[in-house]
Image (cartoon, helix red, strand yellow):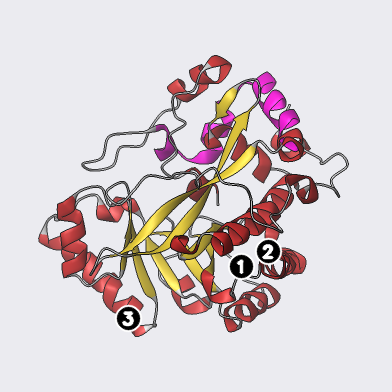
């Protein structure tokens, strides 16, 4: 969830006291791609925050929900054969009233370390469903899911509430699980995910190709979509070996009846190579950066942030704040 929610964030150069942290983040080099702070593993990125800064950000997060400082931006997913926008990914942003834009790399790892991420995840589902209902051009809306939402039927209840409050058809909602996430192995969680799929809700495996899970999740989980990590797209048009690898992934996905989405498409030649390989969809700066919806009056029934945290009197952030 963390990697996905920060994807393509423009908030890598922020003002005030958060700037030194962002500038100091080391990067992992990817072939033909310049290093960026978001290439570093998020757990290590969070560790680079000073203890005092972690506490300030963590202390402000519950208030961010109540004050309406969290927002969603949407990045388009394009059908490669004709360029039509058929889906959008919801990406979380935080505009602090005092400090301005706080990068997702700074606050999402802290939220993931506490139960606050469950409230945030529930609000994201409700807001994304309401936005998709009010703005049909978004197409199918894709929402990143935290591992903390999976146990005990939390996710199923949050999805049901989001669909009921918004009136969004289930077929227009997709849930993203990251390959680097601790993917569910227990029968109860897999049965819950299968129940969501039976309703018509999409289930995507994000960042495929970055973790160590291999092809196992493609067979084990009731997936509808596989999102190829940008590191596999970056070399395109690439060498014969690059094409052969993508062709093998394509053939496996087809055999399993899965839709293929290529992430990180930034150049026309990458788009053309993916279209030639008959990938269904692409996502990346070539097609559009994450952007907020037009500033119109919210539709009736738009969920409030206060409702997302009414049951969190004082959420524990201890797991995210080691001494």
Circle 2 packing at 10 Å, graded few (<14), some (14-19), many (20+), is some
- First-in-chain label (2 vs 3): 2
Q: Can residue 168 be seen?
A: yes
Task: Find disc 2 in the rendering and name its residue.
Answer: 150
Find residue 316 and report its horizontal and vertical position in percent.
81, 40
**Image: 12 above or below 225:** above
Q: Which residues are magenta?
A: 37-62
Q: Residues within 10 Å of mark 1 (few under 14, many from 20)?
A: some
Q: Secondary structure at mark 3?
A: helix
Circle 2: element type: loop
Foreground mark, 2 or 1? 2
What's the mark number on residue 184?
1
**Residue name at image x 49 percent, y 64 percent:** 136
Spatial CA span between label 1 and label 3: 23 Å
Q: Is residue 206 visible?
A: no
Residue 314: which quarter of the image?
A: top right
Residues tagged 1 and 3 counted as in contact (Cβ below 8 A)? no
Principal secondary structure, stretch drawn in magenta? helix
Question: What is the CA distance from the residue labelled 2 to the residue labelled 1?
Answer: 8 Å
Give the residue at x 74% y 39%. 319
Up-down relation of residue 24 to residue 132 (above or below): above
Upstream in the sequence, badge 2 or badge 1?
A: 2
**Sequence order check: which comes first, mark 1 or mark 3?**
1
* Element type at mark 1: loop
On residue 254, the disc is: 3
């Amino acid at each position: 969830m963390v990697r996905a929610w920060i994807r393509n964030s423009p908030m890598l150069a922020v003002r005030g006291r958060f700037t030194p942290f962002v500038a100091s983040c080391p990067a992992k080099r990817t072939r033909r791609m310049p290093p960026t702070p978001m290439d570093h593993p998020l757990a290590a990125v969070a560790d680079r925050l000073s203890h005092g800064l972690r506490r300030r950000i963590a202390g402000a997060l519950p208030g961010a929900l109540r004050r309406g400082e969290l927002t969603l931006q949407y990045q388009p997913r394009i059908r490669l054969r004709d360029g039509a926008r058929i889906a959008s990914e919801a990406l979380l942003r935080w505009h602090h009233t005092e400090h301005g834009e706080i990068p997702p790399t700074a606050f999402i790892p802290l939220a993931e370390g506490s139960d606050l991420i469950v409230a945030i995840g529930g609000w994201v589902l409700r807001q994304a469903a309401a936005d998709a209902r009010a703005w049909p051009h978004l197409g199918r809306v894709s929402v990143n899911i935290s591992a903390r939402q999976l146990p005990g039927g939390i996710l199923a209840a949050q999805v049901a509430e989001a669909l009921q409050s918004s009136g969004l058809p289930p077929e227009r909602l997709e849930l993203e699980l990251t390959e680097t996430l601790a993917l569910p192995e227990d029968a109860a969680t897999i049965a819950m995910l299968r129940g969501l799929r039976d309703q018509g809700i999409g289930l995507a495996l994000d960042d495929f190709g970055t973790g160590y899970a291999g092809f196992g999740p493609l067979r084990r989980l009731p997936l509808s979509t596989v999102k190829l990590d940008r590191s596999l797209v970056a070399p395109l048009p690439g060498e014969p070996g690059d094409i052969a690898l993508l062709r093998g992934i394509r053939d496996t996905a087809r055999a399993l009846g899965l839709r293929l989405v290529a992430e990180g498409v930034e150049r026309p030649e990458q788009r053309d190579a993916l279209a030639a390989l008959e990938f269904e969809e692409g996502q990346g700066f070539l097609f559009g950066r994450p952007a907020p919806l037009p500033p119109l009056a919210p539709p009736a029934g738009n969920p409030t942030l206060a409702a997302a945290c009414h049951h969190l009197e004082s959420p524990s952030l201890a797991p995210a704040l080691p001494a």
